[in-house]
Image (tube, grey):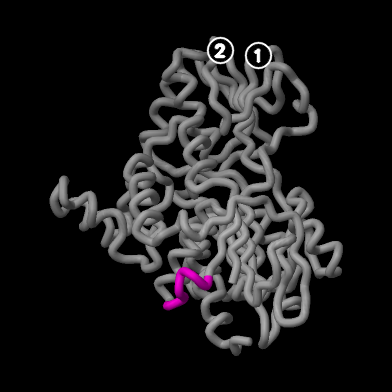
Amino acid sequence: MAIVGGGLAGFTSYVTLLHGGIPAEDITVFGTSLDPAAAWRVRAASIRQQHMRSESDGHCFPTSFPGLAVHAARQAGVVPLIASVCNRYRPTVAEFLEHVEELGDRTGWAGRIRLDWVDRITASDGGFVVDRHGLFQHVLLAPGPAGLAVPDELAGDPRVVHAYQPHEFADRVAIVGAGMAAATEWLNALAAGSRVVSIRRREPERRQLNVPREMFSRRGLAGFQAADPVSRAASLRKLLGPSYPPGRGWDEPLARAAREGRFRVAHEVDGEPQVVCATGFRQGFVHNPLLRRLVAEHDLPTHDRWIELATDSTIPALTDGSRTLALAGAPAQWAYPAADTLVGAKYSARRFLQRVRSCPTP
């Protein structure tokens, strides 16, 4: 089998397959770096992220518990374990990156990587041809984000830098966006002494996770997956809107800066000398050359910006009793709205594993 994508979604899928009994030598991973966190660590450093947004299940281990709290408890006692049981433990970015490195060494990740870019997946008898690398019976596509998003009206503006690119702050800065990255950048810029204008088109939701908590439950997921395609697409657009956590850690610094005249909200950029686009990534399969070509060449059903998937994240038109093609990461949100989280990667990988086990080996 093949995993196309060597980022965190591909890495977590690989670890999950090993845990499910698939021998490492049966798995080939296609990626562009031996470090599965290479792209993520640049983004986290750029927004000066200190802690993970995810809760106790936000790790790359194949099972939910024990997570990173067990490691932290060796230095801090039982407090991290108690927080983990209550689903309130959030590791630091440094702890998470150390975890990825240790788990990669333990599972032989580097030995399974082929450093190559995959441009085409073609259905064939008994499996799928992965570019020039031959036939694989089962393929899990985890291509990662499709590039940084910049609003059309700001494209080419010399003042613009994306939040996920390394940057410092000018004395006056407009920060475009209203999600977690934007909220983090508001505080970063204020801490650097800047005057901040928050450019937003709508007010963000205030929630701890990037989708409502019920979307991680069977009941909430069942209602979402049972909806007709038009309703499901509308739900996804709403669910994936901007949000950041509630709490004094966010509210008090912003309220204080607003009283001092250093923070305000506006609807469009004016004359600020720097514009930080905290606008995330390009959304939809059309922005990913591999997925766009897959859809075009196999005439796959799509809805809005998503490829139609079964509830197990497989592509029904190309998956049968002899082969499997599935998506993981953000492209799998049609099946699981939180697919771009580590929990979501495990959701897709576990169901991919079930498919693999049910198929006869040629």
Residue drawn at point x = 16 percent, y = 46 percent: 76
Characterize the local packing of mark 2: few (<14), some (14-19) or many (20 or more) Cα atoms within 10 angstroms. some
Q: CA distance from mark 1 to mark 2?
A: 9 Å
Q: Label 1 crowding class (10 Å Cα cut-off): few <14, some 14-19, many 20+?
A: some
Q: Secondary structure at mark 2?
A: loop
Q: Do the CB atoms of the residues marked 1 and 2 lie less than 8 Å apart? A: yes
In the image, which disc is placed on residue 170? 2
Q: Which residues are magenta?
A: 21-26
Q: Is residue 99 magenta?
A: no
Q: Amino acid at mark 2?
A: Ala
229 w.r.t. 159: above or below = below
In the image, 193 versus 321, the foreground residue is: 321
Q: Is 24 contained in the magenta span?
A: yes
Of the pair 305 and 313, the residue shown nearer to us: 313
Find residue 152 and report its horizontal and vertical position in percent.
79, 32
Q: Quadrant of the C terminus?
A: bottom right
Q: Which residue is mark 1?
A: 272
Locate the N terminus by quadrant: bottom right
The single residue placed furthest to the left in the displayed view is 77
Query: Camera-side residue: 185 or 161?
Result: 161
Amino acid type of the residue that numbered disc 1 sits on in the rendered structure: Glu
- Of residue 241 and residue 49, the one placed in the foreground of this image is 49
In this picture, residue 320 sits left or right of residue 109: right
Q: Residue at x 65, y 25 (%)?
A: 266
Any part of residue 44 in sight: yes
Can residue 220 be seen by looking at this rendering? Answer: no
Q: Is residue 281 left or right of residue 22?
A: right
Number of numbered discs on residues: 2
Label 1 residue SS: loop
Between label 1 and label 2, give the one nearer the viewer.
Answer: 2
Left or right: where does residue 286 sit relative to residue 39?
A: right
Residue 217 percent location from the top left of the image:
47, 69
